Amino acid sequence: MTKSTDSLSSEAINGLNGTCAIAGDKSISHRALIFSSIAEGTTKIRGLLKSKDVYSTLNALRELGVNISIQKQGLVEVTGTGMHGLQTPSNSLDLGNSGTGVRLLMGLIGSQQISATFIGDNSLSKRPMRRITEPLSQMGVEINDNNGLLPITVNGRSSPLPLSYRSPVASAQIKSAILIAGLNARGMTSVSEPTKSRDHTERMLGHYGISVFSENDSDGNYKVGLIGGGKLKAKDFTVPSDPSSAAFLIVAALITKDSNISLPNIGINSQRIGLISTLQEMGANIKMSNFKEVGGEEVADIYVSSSSLKGVIVPADRAPSMIDEYPILSVAAAMASGPTYMENIGELRHKEADRITVMAEGLRLAGVNVDETDTSMCVHGTKDKWGNSCINGGFRISSQHDHRIAMSFLILGLVSNDKIIVDGVSTIETSFPDFVRTINELGGRINTYKN
Ligand code: S3P
């Protein structure tokens, strides 16, 4: 049973206005902790995301013997153990809901002479891990793989076998786990993927002094590799603001009337902002300025105002650059005129929930027509020829332990004709703990719902 305090309701507003700071990028925060932990020396990390998922990784690294101190003003100091200094933990490593945490740490343990058992919450325990355990086994790492589902025990080795791996899917988690395991391999480890996924690992390894090569191979795949045996050197790091969190505010401002918001210093890595390109093709008024570099990543201030959207076909090869943004795109698509086709999104079925089915079912409750296949979804926008969209509220839906599902339906509530209640909202803490406060400070109406 969901506790009543774990429910929020969201209702129609006039618009969102103002400027708000978005917390640090989740993907980059995990990596900053992991790389600082095996670097030589002490790294000061500024802007680390203080969310449940990131704390799962932080606590696991502490279990592995890393000294991490959380200081005032958001500063986190990590004293690295060097490339071979992690210790076998006395407890299982509980990664909670964090797919990135568990997969990247499996790669890390794989290249240390230690063992660890990984566990997670119900949602993480249903997610496929063979995509990581399989290549790690090929690197000679001994794994009790439990049919590809947690709990999984990894018995690492100080020097795994180098591997040249062709990943069947574009996945930064697969790519990163293998490259991390390859750091201590004797020789070159490389990963090629059908379309380039987010490249934070490649960039950050460069920041810590490891050379990483990348090229487009003869089949047009993106290939990235490194030679094991190098040493990461501690170097202070600043985490840019998370474009995947900003995405909820961007869509909220576009679909509500009389909105004008600005979001400073958002990461605009091209492997992360497929949503912005898609929304601009739909007619969104989104502008960027003040381009800078933070932590080896490009950032910009993003300005968004209310816009009349039309449906589009989202190019299939754009999927990796907006893989976490399809739930909120489908909310924008519901408010648009005409259909929005989303293809090549089968990976959404393996996220915290099956995001295709859960979004489709929820949108149907709101009166939106949605078609789905195994690997695609089409949302039929409700905007009529007079420019009016119609979203029926008055329903209650479960987050299915998925933070992005919870936030997407709360944004939908801001334009619905009656309130939408979302149960199981504590999951939002995994990535965007300030979500409700941020939205409400700009003019949103999201409130605790008690039965
Ligand atoms: C992430 C990669 C993506 C993304 C996830 C974060 C990362 O997963 O969905 O939220 O930090 O590497 P996949 O690698 O499974 O696509």
Image (spheres, helix red, strand yellow):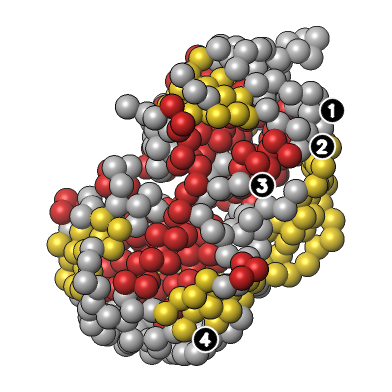
Q: Which residue is mark 4?
A: 42
The answer to whether residue 212 is visible is: no
How far apart marks 2 and 4 lie (CA) works out to 41 Å
Residue 192 vertical position relative to residue 344 in the rendered view, above or below: below
- Taking the spot 20% from the left edge, 59% from the top edge, the residue there is 152
Residue 81 position within the rendered picture, expressed as x and y whole percent measured from the top left: 39, 86
Query: Helix, strand or loop at disc 2?
Result: strand
User: In front: 170, or 352?
Assistant: 352
Mark 1: few/some/many CA within 10 Å (<14, 14-19, 20+): some
> From the Cβ of disc 1, is ligand 1 less than 8 Å away?
no
Mark toward the start of the polypeptide (2 vs 4):
2
Residue 262 position within the rendered picture, expressed as x and y whole percent measured from the top left: 80, 47
Residue 267: name its quadrant: bottom right
Looking at the rendered structure, the kind of residue marked 3 is Ala
Disc ID at residue 258: 1
Q: Are the residues at dot 4 and dot 1 in contact (C-beta closer than 8 Å)?
A: no
The answer to whether residue 146 is visible is: yes
Residue 16 vertical position relative to residue 125 in the rendered view, above or below: above
**In the displayed structure, does residue 348 sit left or right of residue 264?**
left
Task: Count the numbered circles shown.
Answer: 4
Q: Which residue is mark 2?
A: 17
Give the foreground label among 1 and 2: 2
Mark 2: few/some/many CA within 10 Å (<14, 14-19, 20+): some
Residue 38 vertical position relative to residue 394 in the rendered view, above or below: below
Looking at the rendered structure, the kind of residue marked 1 is Asp
Mark toward the start of the polypeptide (1 vs 2):
2
- Taking the spot 57% from the left edge, 32% from the top edge, the residue there is 408
Residue 121 vertical position relative to residue 267 in the rendered view, above or below: above
Q: Which residue is mark 3?
A: 246
Looking at the rendered structure, the kind of residue marked 2 is Asn
